[in-house]
Image (spheres, rainbow, N blue to C red):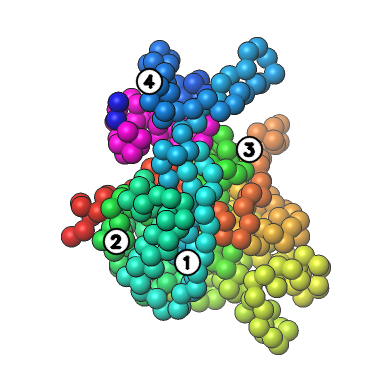
Amino acid sequence: MAGVKELFEDGSSPAGRIVRAIAAIGAATATQLVKSTGLARSTVSTLLTELKDHGVVLDVDTKSNGFGRPSQLLSLNPVAGRCAGVLLGLGEIRIAICDLAHTVLSDVWFAMSEDYSPNDAARCVRASLEEQCAKLGIHLSDLLGVGLAISAPVTYEGEILNGSILPTWCGTNIAEVFSAQFDCPIHVENESHCGALAEMTWGAAVGEPDFVLFKFDLGIGGAIVLDGTVQRGSHGYAAEFGHMSLNPHGPLCRCGNRGCLETFAGGHQLLRYAEQSFGEPVTIEQFVERARKGEPGYTRLVEDAADMAGWGMGLAFTILNPPLFIIAGKLAEVGESFTTGLEKSFARHSVAPPAHSPEKRKPRFVVGTFRGNDDTVMGAVALVLRQHGRIANAASAVV
């Protein structure tokens, strides 16, 4: 039987499908593997026996639903492979390394100049990963893949389309730049899509096949998940909710349009309003803390933002009709003054429920599990675990 790395990279063979499915879930029962791979139960049973014999799969625990015999949970051998997730942020880079059992082995960040280039990023990430891998007793070449999260829409080929966090990177094929430094598959995705993958893997969306995520942070992003798959759209622009225009004569947005949702409920704009009103610069963390404490001016800004956020989510519901909304980002940390106001506004701006069964069309609202940028860097890890946003290996990606 092939090794873990070969099986992990091979999505066509039955054994490879099982390895990938366990990597995505973390720990799974045989029944879950039958469902997720589409393989016959007998095939799954035979292959699991072989994978256990070769030390690829381990029995780790039992799972009970309260009835009958508990089901055996299976995990990939933690020492069989590791992968890395990288958040390419404004002025900083964060890197996490995980094993195939989803254990975080290393989590570091380091500062970068605000005008750092893609090549600078690739070289610094390689140097940091070499150091982290050495501490873990492994080689950089042992990594099964590197996931990259960036605050911009990204094409299927790895080209950055636009974005305000690193605007000079527009048009850069970030996958090619990183593939020149790494001998493993590179996976690239928008950071909000990464946030959805993190929630699906470890957070509020575990077991949820269909949902929409709205991330209210310095900017506003989102993700649409259907049947367990993040929808990227034809060119990578799907779920750019922050740039839905709510008022064509409204404030000028950084994207060039007017009246986008981000100009009313995005963190950058709220910080600008706060500075104009209170005469001093405010960080997003300070804004959230003062709003949580109920300071009047900040409370009003949050209420206004929630009203517009609910309007935008109402439009999304009218188009997509998801059963679940996940609310993520730093503004979600403000608490009920934001989330309750958002839901009230949503009720006013979405399709009215039928009088005889109002609950049938009402979606659930859940605040995301992750705080800070944990969802983004862990989502970059999930890119590799779930084989999402994969571009190519170094040999085929460099032009």
x then y, percent, for residue 288: 70, 67
Q: Which residue is mark 1?
A: 93
Mark 3 and mark 4 lie on one chain; the one further toward the N terminus is 4
The disc labelled 2 sits on which kind of residue? Answer: Gln
Q: Residues within 10 Å of mark 3 (few under 14, many from 20)?
A: some
Residue at left 46%, top 51%? 136
Q: State left or right for residue 32 relative to residue 64.
A: left
Mark 2 residue element: loop
Residue 236 is one of the magenta-drawn residues: no
Residue at left 70%, top 36%? 358
The disc labelled 3 sits on which kind of residue? Answer: Arg
Q: Nearer the viewer, residue 158 or 387?
A: 387
Mark 2 and mark 4 lie on one chain; the one further toward the N terminus is 4
Q: Which residue is mark 4?
A: 50
Residue 17 is one of the magenta-drawn residues: yes
Q: Residues within 10 Å of mark 1 (few under 14, many from 20)?
A: some
